[in-house]
Amino acid sequence: MSSSDIFIGETIGTAILILLGGGVCAAVTLKASKARNAGWLAITFGWGFAVLTAVYTSAPLSGAHLNPAVTLALAIKDGDWSNVPVYWGGQLLGAMIGATLVWVAYYGQFQAHLTDEEIVGDLGARTAEVKSVEARERGAGPVLGVFSTGPEVRVVWQNLATEIIGTVVLVLAVLTQGLNDAGNGLGTLGALITALVVVSIGLSLGGPTGYAINPARDLGPRIVHALLPLPNKGGSDWRYAWIPVAGPLIGGAIAAGIYNVAFA
Protein backbone atom coordinates (compact mmCIF):
# COMPACT_ATOMS: atom_id res chain seq x y z
CA MET A 1 0.00 0.00 0.00
CA SER A 2 1.18 3.50 -0.79
CA SER A 3 1.86 6.28 1.69
CA SER A 4 -1.08 8.24 0.32
CA ASP A 5 -3.42 5.26 0.83
CA ILE A 6 -2.16 4.86 4.39
CA PHE A 7 -2.65 8.53 5.20
CA ILE A 8 -6.13 8.69 3.66
CA GLY A 9 -7.21 5.41 5.25
CA GLU A 10 -6.00 6.37 8.71
CA THR A 11 -7.54 9.84 8.45
CA ILE A 12 -10.94 8.50 7.41
CA GLY A 13 -10.88 5.58 9.83
CA THR A 14 -9.80 7.59 12.86
CA ALA A 15 -12.32 10.32 12.02
CA ILE A 16 -15.09 7.69 12.05
CA LEU A 17 -13.73 6.22 15.29
CA ILE A 18 -13.82 9.56 17.08
CA LEU A 19 -17.09 10.69 15.50
CA LEU A 20 -18.91 7.61 16.79
CA GLY A 21 -16.93 7.23 20.03
CA GLY A 22 -17.07 10.91 20.93
CA GLY A 23 -20.64 10.93 19.70
CA VAL A 24 -21.76 8.42 22.30
CA CYS A 25 -20.01 10.46 25.00
CA ALA A 26 -21.87 13.55 23.80
CA ALA A 27 -25.16 11.66 23.66
CA VAL A 28 -24.82 10.49 27.26
CA THR A 29 -23.45 13.76 28.64
CA LEU A 30 -25.19 16.71 27.02
CA LYS A 31 -28.42 18.42 28.00
CA ALA A 32 -31.27 17.95 25.50
CA SER A 33 -29.79 14.72 24.14
CA LYS A 34 -32.26 11.85 23.93
CA ALA A 35 -29.61 9.48 25.33
CA ARG A 36 -28.56 11.65 28.27
CA ASN A 37 -27.61 9.64 31.37
CA ALA A 38 -27.68 6.36 29.44
CA GLY A 39 -24.60 5.37 31.43
CA TRP A 40 -21.27 3.59 31.19
CA LEU A 41 -22.60 0.55 29.33
CA ALA A 42 -23.78 2.77 26.49
CA ILE A 43 -20.36 4.43 26.33
CA THR A 44 -18.38 1.19 26.32
CA PHE A 45 -20.52 -0.47 23.67
CA GLY A 46 -20.61 2.76 21.65
CA TRP A 47 -16.81 2.82 21.54
CA GLY A 48 -16.69 -0.87 20.65
CA PHE A 49 -19.04 -0.38 17.70
CA ALA A 50 -17.06 2.73 16.73
CA VAL A 51 -13.91 0.60 16.50
CA LEU A 52 -15.72 -2.03 14.46
CA THR A 53 -17.08 0.51 11.96
CA ALA A 54 -13.79 2.37 11.65
CA VAL A 55 -11.74 -0.79 11.11
CA TYR A 56 -14.03 -2.19 8.44
CA THR A 57 -14.03 1.16 6.64
CA SER A 58 -10.30 1.85 6.63
CA ALA A 59 -8.76 -1.63 6.51
CA PRO A 60 -8.65 -1.86 2.69
CA LEU A 61 -6.60 1.34 2.48
CA SER A 62 -4.30 1.33 5.49
CA GLY A 63 -4.75 -1.88 7.47
CA ALA A 64 -6.74 0.09 10.06
CA HIS A 65 -4.19 0.83 12.77
CA LEU A 66 -6.21 3.85 13.97
CA ASN A 67 -3.98 4.11 17.02
CA PRO A 68 -0.34 5.26 17.34
CA ALA A 69 0.26 2.55 19.95
CA VAL A 70 -0.77 -0.14 17.45
CA THR A 71 1.45 1.42 14.77
CA LEU A 72 4.39 1.52 17.20
CA ALA A 73 3.84 -2.10 18.22
CA LEU A 74 3.70 -3.31 14.62
CA ALA A 75 6.87 -1.37 13.80
CA ILE A 76 8.67 -3.00 16.75
CA LYS A 77 7.30 -6.42 15.80
CA ASP A 78 8.24 -6.20 12.10
CA GLY A 79 11.22 -3.82 12.24
CA ASP A 80 9.68 -1.58 9.56
CA TRP A 81 9.52 2.07 10.64
CA SER A 82 9.19 3.65 7.20
CA ASN A 83 5.50 4.56 7.38
CA VAL A 84 5.16 5.27 11.09
CA PRO A 85 5.06 9.09 10.63
CA VAL A 86 2.43 8.70 7.88
CA TYR A 87 0.23 6.55 10.11
CA TRP A 88 0.62 8.90 13.07
CA GLY A 89 -0.11 11.99 10.99
CA GLY A 90 -3.30 10.51 9.55
CA GLN A 91 -4.44 9.31 12.95
CA LEU A 92 -4.01 12.70 14.61
CA LEU A 93 -5.68 14.57 11.75
CA GLY A 94 -8.54 12.08 11.66
CA ALA A 95 -9.07 12.37 15.40
CA MET A 96 -9.32 16.15 15.12
CA ILE A 97 -11.77 15.90 12.22
CA GLY A 98 -13.90 13.39 14.10
CA ALA A 99 -14.02 15.56 17.22
CA THR A 100 -15.03 18.58 15.15
CA LEU A 101 -17.84 16.57 13.54
CA VAL A 102 -19.11 15.62 17.01
CA TRP A 103 -19.36 19.34 17.79
CA VAL A 104 -21.25 19.95 14.53
CA ALA A 105 -23.66 17.07 15.12
CA TYR A 106 -24.37 18.15 18.70
CA TYR A 107 -24.02 21.91 18.26
CA GLY A 108 -27.40 22.76 19.78
CA GLN A 109 -26.86 20.38 22.69
CA PHE A 110 -23.44 21.89 23.44
CA GLN A 111 -24.99 25.37 23.47
CA ALA A 112 -27.87 24.30 25.70
CA HIS A 113 -25.59 22.42 28.09
CA LEU A 114 -22.97 25.15 28.43
CA THR A 115 -25.48 27.97 28.88
CA ASP A 116 -27.63 26.12 31.39
CA GLU A 117 -27.71 28.14 34.62
CA GLU A 118 -27.30 25.10 36.84
CA ILE A 119 -24.27 23.81 34.93
CA VAL A 120 -22.66 27.24 34.52
CA GLY A 121 -23.40 28.03 38.16
CA ASP A 122 -21.70 24.84 39.31
CA LEU A 123 -18.70 25.64 37.12
CA GLY A 124 -18.47 29.14 38.55
CA ALA A 125 -18.70 27.86 42.09
CA ARG A 126 -15.95 25.32 41.49
CA THR A 127 -13.77 27.97 39.87
CA ALA A 128 -14.29 30.38 42.76
CA GLU A 129 -13.07 27.77 45.21
CA VAL A 130 -9.73 27.48 43.41
CA LYS A 131 -7.19 30.07 44.54
CA SER A 132 -4.26 29.67 42.13
CA VAL A 133 -4.11 30.07 38.36
CA GLU A 134 -2.03 26.90 38.17
CA ALA A 135 -4.77 24.86 39.84
CA ARG A 136 -7.48 26.35 37.60
CA GLU A 137 -5.53 25.39 34.49
CA ARG A 138 -5.24 21.84 35.81
CA GLY A 139 -9.01 21.38 35.96
CA ALA A 140 -11.23 19.98 33.24
CA GLY A 141 -14.20 21.84 31.83
CA PRO A 142 -17.76 20.46 31.98
CA VAL A 143 -17.72 18.96 28.46
CA LEU A 144 -14.06 17.92 28.18
CA GLY A 145 -15.13 14.31 28.76
CA VAL A 146 -16.94 14.38 25.41
CA PHE A 147 -13.58 15.00 23.73
CA SER A 148 -10.88 13.36 25.84
CA THR A 149 -10.26 11.37 28.99
CA GLY A 150 -9.51 12.23 32.59
CA PRO A 151 -8.97 10.43 35.89
CA GLU A 152 -11.54 10.01 38.60
CA VAL A 153 -8.72 10.12 41.17
CA ARG A 154 -5.48 11.93 40.29
CA VAL A 155 -2.64 9.60 41.21
CA VAL A 156 -0.07 10.00 38.47
CA TRP A 157 1.60 6.61 38.71
CA GLN A 158 -1.75 4.82 38.94
CA ASN A 159 -3.27 6.78 36.05
CA LEU A 160 -0.22 6.03 33.90
CA ALA A 161 -0.21 2.36 34.92
CA THR A 162 -3.91 2.01 34.11
CA GLU A 163 -3.38 3.33 30.59
CA ILE A 164 -0.34 1.09 30.11
CA ILE A 165 -2.17 -2.03 31.30
CA GLY A 166 -5.25 -1.38 29.16
CA THR A 167 -3.14 -0.75 26.08
CA VAL A 168 -1.09 -3.91 26.58
CA VAL A 169 -4.32 -5.91 26.53
CA LEU A 170 -5.57 -4.12 23.41
CA VAL A 171 -2.34 -4.37 21.44
CA LEU A 172 -1.71 -8.01 22.33
CA ALA A 173 -5.19 -8.77 21.00
CA VAL A 174 -4.38 -6.92 17.78
CA LEU A 175 -1.03 -8.68 17.35
CA THR A 176 -2.34 -12.17 18.06
CA GLN A 177 -5.83 -12.17 16.55
CA GLY A 178 -6.82 -11.99 12.91
CA LEU A 179 -4.11 -9.88 11.24
CA ASN A 180 -4.67 -9.53 7.53
CA ASP A 181 -2.67 -11.51 4.99
CA ALA A 182 -0.07 -8.77 4.64
CA GLY A 183 0.41 -8.71 8.40
CA ASN A 184 0.11 -4.91 8.55
CA GLY A 185 -3.30 -4.48 10.09
CA LEU A 186 -6.53 -6.11 11.19
CA GLY A 187 -8.34 -8.65 9.09
CA THR A 188 -12.11 -9.20 9.12
CA LEU A 189 -12.12 -11.49 12.15
CA GLY A 190 -9.58 -9.27 13.92
CA ALA A 191 -11.89 -6.28 13.57
CA LEU A 192 -14.70 -8.00 15.44
CA ILE A 193 -12.39 -9.40 18.10
CA THR A 194 -10.74 -6.03 18.66
CA ALA A 195 -14.09 -4.28 18.97
CA LEU A 196 -15.13 -6.75 21.67
CA VAL A 197 -11.76 -6.34 23.41
CA VAL A 198 -12.32 -2.56 23.50
CA VAL A 199 -15.72 -3.13 25.13
CA SER A 200 -14.10 -5.49 27.65
CA ILE A 201 -11.34 -2.98 28.48
CA GLY A 202 -13.93 -0.26 28.95
CA LEU A 203 -16.04 -2.36 31.29
CA SER A 204 -13.13 -3.78 33.30
CA LEU A 205 -10.40 -1.12 33.20
CA GLY A 206 -12.13 2.05 32.04
CA GLY A 207 -13.31 3.28 35.42
CA PRO A 208 -10.12 4.94 36.72
CA THR A 209 -9.14 7.05 33.67
CA GLY A 210 -11.76 6.64 30.96
CA TYR A 211 -9.48 4.26 28.99
CA ALA A 212 -7.87 6.38 26.29
CA ILE A 213 -5.62 3.44 25.22
CA ASN A 214 -4.90 5.52 22.09
CA PRO A 215 -2.78 8.70 22.01
CA ALA A 216 -4.49 10.17 18.94
CA ARG A 217 -7.94 9.48 20.36
CA ASP A 218 -7.13 11.69 23.35
CA LEU A 219 -4.74 14.33 22.01
CA GLY A 220 -6.56 15.22 18.79
CA PRO A 221 -9.95 15.86 20.43
CA ARG A 222 -8.28 17.68 23.34
CA ILE A 223 -6.72 20.10 20.85
CA VAL A 224 -10.14 20.58 19.23
CA HIS A 225 -11.71 21.26 22.64
CA ALA A 226 -9.10 23.94 23.26
CA LEU A 227 -9.79 25.57 19.87
CA LEU A 228 -13.58 25.38 19.56
CA PRO A 229 -15.68 28.46 20.43
CA LEU A 230 -17.65 26.70 23.16
CA PRO A 231 -19.21 29.01 25.77
CA ASN A 232 -18.12 28.40 29.37
CA LYS A 233 -16.14 25.36 28.25
CA GLY A 234 -13.54 25.52 31.02
CA GLY A 235 -10.02 24.12 30.81
CA SER A 236 -8.61 21.38 28.59
CA ASP A 237 -6.58 19.84 31.46
CA TRP A 238 -3.23 19.98 29.67
CA ARG A 239 -1.39 18.95 32.83
CA TYR A 240 -2.97 15.51 32.55
CA ALA A 241 -2.73 15.28 28.74
CA TRP A 242 0.69 13.57 28.64
CA ILE A 243 -0.60 10.46 30.46
CA PRO A 244 -3.04 9.26 27.76
CA VAL A 245 -0.25 9.81 25.22
CA ALA A 246 2.71 8.29 27.06
CA GLY A 247 0.78 5.46 28.72
CA PRO A 248 -0.56 3.89 25.51
CA LEU A 249 2.79 4.26 23.71
CA ILE A 250 4.57 2.53 26.58
CA GLY A 251 1.87 -0.13 26.63
CA GLY A 252 2.17 -0.68 22.89
CA ALA A 253 5.93 -1.13 23.16
CA ILE A 254 5.55 -3.57 26.07
CA ALA A 255 2.92 -5.57 24.14
CA ALA A 256 5.23 -5.80 21.14
CA GLY A 257 8.04 -7.03 23.39
CA ILE A 258 5.77 -9.67 24.94
CA TYR A 259 4.67 -10.77 21.47
CA ASN A 260 8.23 -11.07 20.17
CA VAL A 261 9.29 -13.11 23.19
CA ALA A 262 6.25 -15.31 23.65
CA PHE A 263 4.50 -15.60 20.29
CA ALA A 264 6.95 -14.89 17.47
Image (spheres, rainbow, N blue to C red):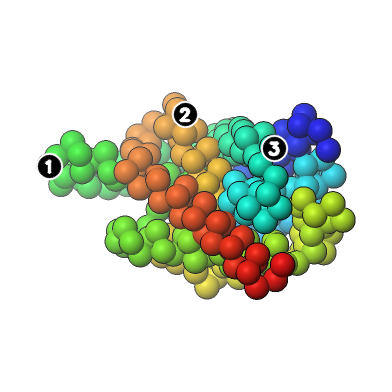
User: Where is mark 1, residue-wise?
Assistant: 131
In this rendering, position of residue 126 left or right of residue 103 = left
**Quadrant in the picture for the N terminus:** top right
Marks 3 and 1, how far apart in space? Answer: 47 Å
Residue type, mark 3 in image? Asn
Q: Earlier in the sequence, mark 3 or mark 2?
A: 3
Q: Earlier in the sequence, mark 2 or mark 1?
A: 1
User: Where is mark 3, residue-wise?
Assistant: 83
Asked whether disc 3 touches disc 1, contact meaning CB atoms under 8 Å apart, the reply is no
Label 3 or label 1, whichever lies nearer to me, is 3
Q: Position of residue 93 (x, y in %)?
A: 61, 32
Instruction: Work out whether residue 241 or residue 70 is closer to the camera in this orientation and state it.
Output: 70
Asked whether disc 2 touches disc 1, contact meaning CB atoms under 8 Å apart, the reply is no
Q: Position of residue 29 (x, y in %)?
A: 48, 52
Q: Earlier in the sequence, mark 3 or mark 1?
A: 3
Marks 2 and 1, how far apart in space? Answer: 26 Å
Label 1 crowd (10 A; few <14 / some 14-19 / many >=20): few
User: Where is mark 2, residue-wise?
Assistant: 228
Marks 3 and 2, how far apart in space? Answer: 31 Å
Label 3 crowd (10 A; few <14 / some 14-19 / many >=20): some
Choose top left, top right, bottom left or bottom right for residue 238: top left
Residue type, mark 2 in image? Leu
Residue found 75% across the figure and 36% down from its top: 6
